[in-house]
Image: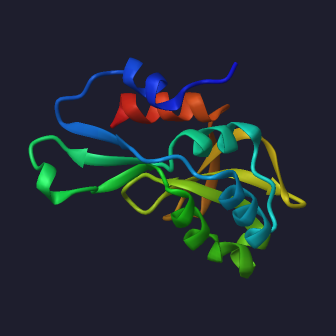
Amino acid sequence: MDLKWPDFSKQLRKDQILNYCFYDSVPESQLVEAECKIKIVFPDELKAFYRQTDGIGIELVAYPDIGIIDYLILPLEKVLEYSWFLHGDWFAEKNLLFIAPNGNGDYFGYEVVEGRMKSTQIYKWDHEDDSIELYSTSLAMFIQKQIETN
């Protein structure tokens, strides 16, 4: 099933505190360039997401002038910025491509094995104890879970 991400998120819990902001889609050429740049093939669900919106930003409803305070899903360029982990010893041990922060220093990402995402499962990396745990089995489930817990 090809989900329409902005429509999908609108169906989830309405929030009086947070506003979820969607961006223009990422051109196919930019997706291909990103995969080549970090030498990782993105899973189909992540590519489908970026083809519809370049991330999901979070704003405070009461203070819209502040702008984006965090991201539910990082814009593609931010994913690339955070890919510096790919080039150090840390990545060799953890093998995660981060797609979202949680606001307290922890990150969520796909497990990468030999340049491909091992599955559509998304893991949470805890920066305090360096542990990794399964958080969701798909991007849609991840987004729903994050909106429900924010």
Residue 1 locus on image (x, y percent):
70, 18
**In the visual, does 14 lie left or right of 65?**
right
Q: Which residue is at 38% across, 24% downward?
A: 10
Corner quadrant of residue 51: top right
Residue projecting furthest to the bottom: 88
**Given the current orientation, which residue lies at the most extreme right position?**
114
Quadrant of the image for the C terminus? Answer: top left
Is residue 11 or residue 133 the one in the foreground? 11
Residue 138 percent across, percent down from the top left? 65, 32
Can residue 129 be seen by looking at this rendering? no
Q: Is residue 36 left or right of residue 149?
A: right
Q: Nearer the viewer, residue 103 or 5?
A: 5
Q: Residue at x 72, y 81 (%)?
A: 88
Query: Does the image show residue 77?
Result: yes
* Count of numbered labels shown in the rendering: 0
Q: Is residue 101 left or right of residue 36?
A: left
- The residue located at (74%, 70%) in the rendering is 38
Question: Of 103 and 79, which appears nearest the observer?
Answer: 79
> As rendered, which of 81 and 150 lies closer to the eye?
81
The quadrant in which residue 21 appears is top left
**Whole-percent x, y for residue 13 in the image:** 33, 21
Indicate how the structure is coloured in the image: rainbow
Measured as percent of width and height from the top left, residue 86 is found at: 72, 73
Q: Is residue 82 above or below residue 101?
A: below
Q: Quadrant of residue 91?
A: bottom right
